[in-house]
Amino acid sequence: MLGAIPGLLHLMLAITVACVVVDYQMRRIELTISPQMRYAVWFMVWGLLTTAVKSPDVFFERLMDLLPTACVMLALGFGCASPRGLRIFVITLVGCAVLVTCVALKQAYTPLECMISDPVGESLTPDGRACEVRADCWVDAPDPYAEYRCERPGPFATTTIADRVRYRGTLHDPNDLSLMAGMTIPFALTLTRRNRRLAHPSAGLRLAPSPRPYAPAMEPRTFLSWVSATVRMLFVTANLAGIGTMIVFARSRMGLIVYLVIITLCVLQRHGLKGIFVAGFAGTPMVMFGGRSGDEAEGSTDARIELLRDGFDMIQHTMGIGIGVGQFADESPNAQTAHNSYLLAAAETGVVGVCLFALLLYTSLKVSFKIWRGGYNIDTTVLRFAAAVFVSLCGALVGIFFLSWSYKDMLYIVVGASMALYGIAHAQDPRISIRLSKKEIVAVCCAIFTLLGVLNIYLHIRR
């Protein structure tokens, strides 16, 4: 919505950065350099260097594309490095997910209308005529030379695409919308849990519960607790059902996989192995009704396979140097991006770039996991946010295998939350110091090359 006003997002970003500087000057936050921050900066800088060498004519344009993403990531990493700041961020993120989910669900239940499509096919303008199929739009058409689609309109000038729900801007693709919404599920579950400020159990600092006198069943405090628990349960149920239904209407196979992965990890976190049956019960109807099938699904799969082959051709032709950030669609004969973040990073930023990208993802996972399970003397609320960041990143690692999210703002927003976690945890327990050993760096680089090698073998088998 804000993207419709030119320059407003950049103005808000500048205000956010200014607020971070003010908070630092007033000693409300500390600028702690997290381990994943250096890999994120190095990856973006290396990508720009590759662009300057291979495609110098678009260097400034790519710099302007990456700069807002980097600023948002660093602003979150520094500005949300407090329990209150992190909580505000999580509430904002979950609120955005609720908004786009409601918009998508409203689209799904709106009658079909004829829409005029722009030459690119991204922007659709309803003309007010009802339709059932696309051919109906050419009957008594106001402009017989226009390109028409039969789609569903939604709030904020949104429309479906091929009858798949979506949003606007960076979430104009149904798959992007599905992954973004799925990644917010762990944060929504964290907000609904009761806030008890206790140290980590393994830190040996948990206080013994003090005895409380007997209270009648309908005492106001007990009744309010019951109401609060009921409201939290209803919010969780509505959130999970809403996002799941939206993914079904988006017909996103990747979104379905990520949703089931995240739900399974969340249930395992709370209920152990017994929770797998709950996740399986919740995922069964989505498997039955979600995703695409038939000729449409096969055509999409074949197109993606061709794009993957284009990516490996680019790696081979550039001798592992890369073609430059944002150049994949221009270099590909199919005029599309790779639909695989790992291969996209390798094709555009080369061997060094994909290693830095893999190290960034691995370090973000390690930081959140170590804070969550490391047994440090940290506030329990922060531990829950660490668990949410870890599960969200796990879902992202699965989803970006099917999407071009190497420089996506949503991915770096969660990475920024991981950076903020490190700053909070280090302030609460100075013993925390997370680094990558040489063996880990070598193992991560070997793992990403192995993944790309297996993918290349698969493409050769498919020939």
Image: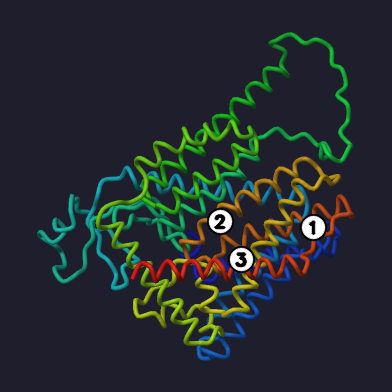
Residue indicated by mark 2: 396
Residue at 75% of width from left, 63% of height from top?
Answer: 20
Q: Which amino acid does label 1 sit on?
A: Gly
Query: Which amino acid, mark 3?
Result: Ala
Give residue 405's position: percent from left, percent from top.
Answer: 52, 65
Is residue 8 in view from this perspective? no
Ranked by sequence position, the earlier of labels 2 and 1 is: 2
Q: Residues within 10 Å of mark 2 (few under 14, many from 20)?
A: many
Residue 11, numbered label? none
Give the total number of marks visible in the rendering: 3
Q: Is mark 3 on a helix, strand or loop?
A: helix
Whole-percent x, y for residue 24 in the image: 82, 63
* 101 w.r.t. 71: above or below: above
Q: Distance between the residues labelled 3 and 2?
A: 17 Å
Tell me: residue 66, above or below residue 29: below
**Res. 447 mark:** 3
> In which quadrant is the C terminus drawn?
bottom left
Q: Relative to the observer, which residue lies in front, 58 or 147?
A: 58
